[in-house]
Image: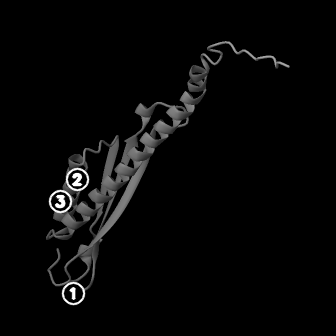
Protein backbone atom coordinates (compact mmCIF):
# COMPACT_ATOMS: atom_id res chain seq x y z
CA UNK A 1 0.00 0.00 0.00
CA UNK A 2 1.23 3.45 -0.82
CA UNK A 3 1.35 6.32 1.63
CA UNK A 4 0.34 9.69 0.31
CA UNK A 5 3.14 12.13 -0.20
CA UNK A 6 3.08 15.52 1.41
CA UNK A 7 4.13 18.21 -0.94
CA UNK A 8 5.41 21.51 0.25
CA UNK A 9 5.47 24.47 -1.95
CA UNK A 10 9.02 25.57 -2.85
CA UNK A 11 9.95 28.79 -1.08
CA UNK A 12 7.29 28.47 1.61
CA UNK A 13 9.58 30.17 4.15
CA UNK A 14 10.22 33.18 1.98
CA UNK A 15 10.40 36.44 3.92
CA UNK A 16 10.83 34.86 7.35
CA UNK A 17 14.40 36.17 7.71
CA UNK A 18 13.24 39.70 6.91
CA UNK A 19 10.48 39.43 9.48
CA UNK A 20 12.88 38.15 12.15
CA UNK A 21 15.29 40.97 11.41
CA UNK A 22 12.50 43.54 11.63
CA UNK A 23 11.55 42.18 15.05
CA UNK A 24 15.12 41.97 16.41
CA UNK A 25 16.59 45.18 14.94
CA UNK A 26 15.18 47.66 17.53
CA UNK A 27 16.48 45.52 20.41
CA UNK A 28 19.93 45.21 18.84
CA UNK A 29 20.02 48.95 18.17
CA UNK A 30 19.13 49.66 21.80
CA UNK A 31 21.96 47.43 22.99
CA UNK A 32 24.45 49.24 20.74
CA UNK A 33 23.28 52.67 21.94
CA UNK A 34 23.53 51.64 25.60
CA UNK A 35 27.04 50.25 25.02
CA UNK A 36 28.17 53.46 23.31
CA UNK A 37 26.75 55.62 26.13
CA UNK A 38 28.28 53.38 28.83
CA UNK A 39 31.66 53.42 27.06
CA UNK A 40 31.61 57.19 26.78
CA UNK A 41 30.78 57.58 30.48
CA UNK A 42 33.51 55.10 31.49
CA UNK A 43 36.16 56.85 29.39
CA UNK A 44 35.08 60.24 30.71
CA UNK A 45 35.29 58.92 34.28
CA UNK A 46 38.87 57.79 33.73
CA UNK A 47 39.76 61.10 32.11
CA UNK A 48 38.28 63.15 34.96
CA UNK A 49 40.14 61.03 37.53
CA UNK A 50 43.41 61.57 35.68
CA UNK A 51 42.76 65.32 35.47
CA UNK A 52 42.05 65.51 39.21
CA UNK A 53 45.23 63.59 39.96
CA UNK A 54 47.30 65.84 37.69
CA UNK A 55 45.79 68.96 39.26
CA UNK A 56 46.47 67.80 42.82
CA UNK A 57 50.05 66.84 42.05
CA UNK A 58 50.80 70.06 40.20
CA UNK A 59 49.27 72.16 42.99
CA UNK A 60 51.21 70.29 45.69
CA UNK A 61 54.60 71.26 44.25
CA UNK A 62 53.77 74.99 44.10
CA UNK A 63 55.37 77.40 46.59
CA UNK A 64 52.25 79.32 47.63
CA UNK A 65 48.52 78.75 47.84
CA UNK A 66 47.85 81.28 45.08
CA UNK A 67 50.32 79.63 42.72
CA UNK A 68 48.95 76.21 43.68
CA UNK A 69 45.40 77.17 42.75
CA UNK A 70 46.48 78.55 39.38
CA UNK A 71 48.78 75.69 38.45
CA UNK A 72 46.23 73.10 39.55
CA UNK A 73 43.51 74.70 37.41
CA UNK A 74 45.83 74.81 34.38
CA UNK A 75 46.97 71.21 34.86
CA UNK A 76 43.41 69.91 35.04
CA UNK A 77 42.29 71.78 31.93
CA UNK A 78 45.38 70.65 29.99
CA UNK A 79 44.80 67.06 31.05
CA UNK A 80 41.18 67.15 29.88
CA UNK A 81 42.23 68.71 26.57
CA UNK A 82 45.05 66.20 25.97
CA UNK A 83 42.65 63.32 26.48
CA UNK A 84 40.21 64.81 23.99
CA UNK A 85 37.47 64.94 26.60
CA UNK A 86 34.91 67.57 25.60
CA UNK A 87 32.94 68.65 28.63
CA UNK A 88 29.78 70.70 28.23
CA UNK A 89 30.98 72.42 31.38
CA UNK A 90 34.01 71.69 33.52
CA UNK A 91 34.85 73.00 36.96
CA UNK A 92 38.09 72.59 38.87
CA UNK A 93 38.22 73.26 42.61
CA UNK A 94 41.60 73.29 44.35
CA UNK A 95 41.58 73.22 48.16
CA UNK A 96 44.83 74.87 49.23
CA UNK A 97 44.06 75.04 52.96
CA UNK A 98 47.06 72.77 53.60
CA UNK A 99 49.33 75.75 53.00
CA UNK A 100 48.06 77.33 56.23
CA UNK A 101 49.48 74.47 58.33
CA UNK A 102 52.94 75.17 59.74
CA UNK A 103 55.94 73.40 58.19
CA UNK A 104 56.66 70.05 59.78
CA UNK A 105 53.01 68.99 59.96
CA UNK A 106 51.45 66.73 57.34
CA UNK A 107 49.11 68.53 54.94
CA UNK A 108 47.44 67.76 51.64
CA UNK A 109 46.11 69.56 48.60
CA UNK A 110 42.75 68.37 47.30
CA UNK A 111 41.61 68.80 43.70
CA UNK A 112 38.04 68.16 42.60
CA UNK A 113 37.21 68.06 38.89
CA UNK A 114 33.63 67.99 37.64
CA UNK A 115 32.76 67.40 33.99
CA UNK A 116 29.33 67.30 32.34
CA UNK A 117 29.47 64.82 29.44
CA UNK A 118 26.86 65.16 26.71
CA UNK A 119 25.09 62.01 25.58
CA UNK A 120 22.55 63.71 23.32
CA UNK A 121 24.15 62.44 20.12
CA UNK A 122 23.16 58.90 21.06
CA UNK A 123 19.57 60.21 20.59
CA UNK A 124 17.64 57.22 21.83
CA UNK A 125 14.66 57.40 24.16
CA UNK A 126 15.56 56.65 27.77
CA UNK A 127 19.21 57.75 27.44
CA UNK A 128 19.80 60.90 29.52
CA UNK A 129 21.02 64.03 27.73
CA UNK A 130 24.08 64.54 29.95
CA UNK A 131 25.94 62.90 32.78
CA UNK A 132 27.90 64.70 35.49
CA UNK A 133 31.16 63.04 36.47
CA UNK A 134 33.16 64.16 39.51
CA UNK A 135 36.55 62.97 40.73
CA UNK A 136 38.63 64.04 43.72
CA UNK A 137 42.36 63.50 44.26
CA UNK A 138 44.72 64.39 47.08
CA UNK A 139 48.44 64.99 47.04
CA UNK A 140 50.64 65.56 50.09
CA UNK A 141 52.65 68.71 50.68
CA UNK A 142 56.31 68.28 51.55
CA UNK A 143 56.41 68.59 55.36
CA UNK A 144 59.95 70.08 55.36
CA UNK A 145 59.32 72.82 52.83
CA UNK A 146 58.30 76.34 53.75
CA UNK A 147 54.68 77.30 53.08
CA UNK A 148 53.11 80.65 52.25
Image side of residue 98 versus residue 114, left or right? left
Q: Residues within 10 Å of mark 1 (few under 14, many from 20)?
A: few
Which-is-in-front pick, marks 2 and 3?
2
* Residue occupied by mark 2: 79
Marks 2 and 3, how far apart at CA: 12 Å
Q: Residues within 10 Å of mark 2 (few under 14, many from 20)?
A: some
Q: Is residue 13 above or below residue 54?
A: above
* Residue occupied by mark 1: 104
Is the N terminus in the top left, top right, bottom left or bottom right quadrant? top right
Marks 3 and 1, how far apart at CA: 23 Å
Q: Residue furthest bottom?
A: 104
Q: Is residue 142 above or below residue 68?
A: below
Marks 1 and 2, how far apart at CA: 31 Å
Is the C terminus in the top left, top right, bottom left or bottom right quadrant? bottom left
Q: Please, what secondary structure does the residue beneath circle 3 have? A: helix
Image side of residue 56 versus residue 20, left or right? left
Q: Which mark is residue 71?
A: 3
Residue 23 in view, yes or no = yes
The numbered mark, 3 or 1, whose residue comes first in the sequence reads 3
Q: Nearer the viewer, residue 139 or 41?
A: 41
Q: Please, what secondary structure does the residue beneath circle 2 have? A: helix
The numbered mark, 2 or 3, whose residue comes first in the sequence reads 3
Amino acid sequence: MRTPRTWTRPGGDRGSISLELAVLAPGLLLIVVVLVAAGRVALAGQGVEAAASDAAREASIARSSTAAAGSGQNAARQSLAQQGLRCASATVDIDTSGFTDPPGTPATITATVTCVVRLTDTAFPGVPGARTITATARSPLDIYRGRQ
